[in-house]
Image (cartoon, helix red, strand yellow):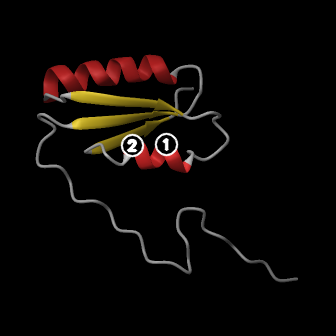
Amino acid sequence: MTFKVLDPRVDPEGEPLRLAAPLPTLEGAVVALLDNAKIGTARLYDFVAEILASEYGVREFMRRRKPDASRPVPREMLAEMSAADALVSAIGD
């Protein structure tokens, strides 16, 4: 019997992933907050947004919620959030 191990983080046939360059500052930035649809995420993001705005000068937040925690983010939602300077994805369990 042969086993094939798949890495869910990358497409082995595609281009290798590269990290985006870090932002020099969050001052005036737009940050997308992706909610995974679990119970505690909205409350967590309330706290995160307060800190990012008051301590780091984030100008605006783009908050979006996945339809379901077990499914990937819809392409349309990802496309919309790509306009942000940074994106935070968290699990609110």
Q: Position of residue 14 (x, y in %)?
A: 51, 78
Q: Residue 77 bears which disc, if any?
A: 1
The quarter of the picture where residue 6 lies is bottom right
- Mark 1–mark 2 Cα distance, whole angstroms, equals 6 Å
Locate residue 86 relative to residue 26 in the image: left or right: right
Which image quadrant: the N terminus?
bottom right
Q: Position of residue 22 (x, y in %)?
A: 20, 53
The correct choice, above or below, for 21 with respect to 44 in the image is: below
Q: Position of residue 52 (x, y in %)?
A: 23, 27
Residue situated furthest right in the rendering: 1
Label 2 belongs to which residue?
A: 81
Q: Amino acid at mark 2?
A: Met
The quarter of the picture where residue 55 lies is top left
Near mark 1 (Cα within 10 A), the count class, few <14, some 14-19 or many ≥20, is: few
Marks 1 & 2, CB-CB < 8 Å contact: yes
Q: Amino acid at mark 1?
A: Met
Residue sitting at 52 percent across and 27 percent down? 92
Which image quadrant: the C terminus?
top right
- Is 61 or 25 nearer to us in this picture? 61
Residue sitting at 55 percent across and 72 percent down? 11
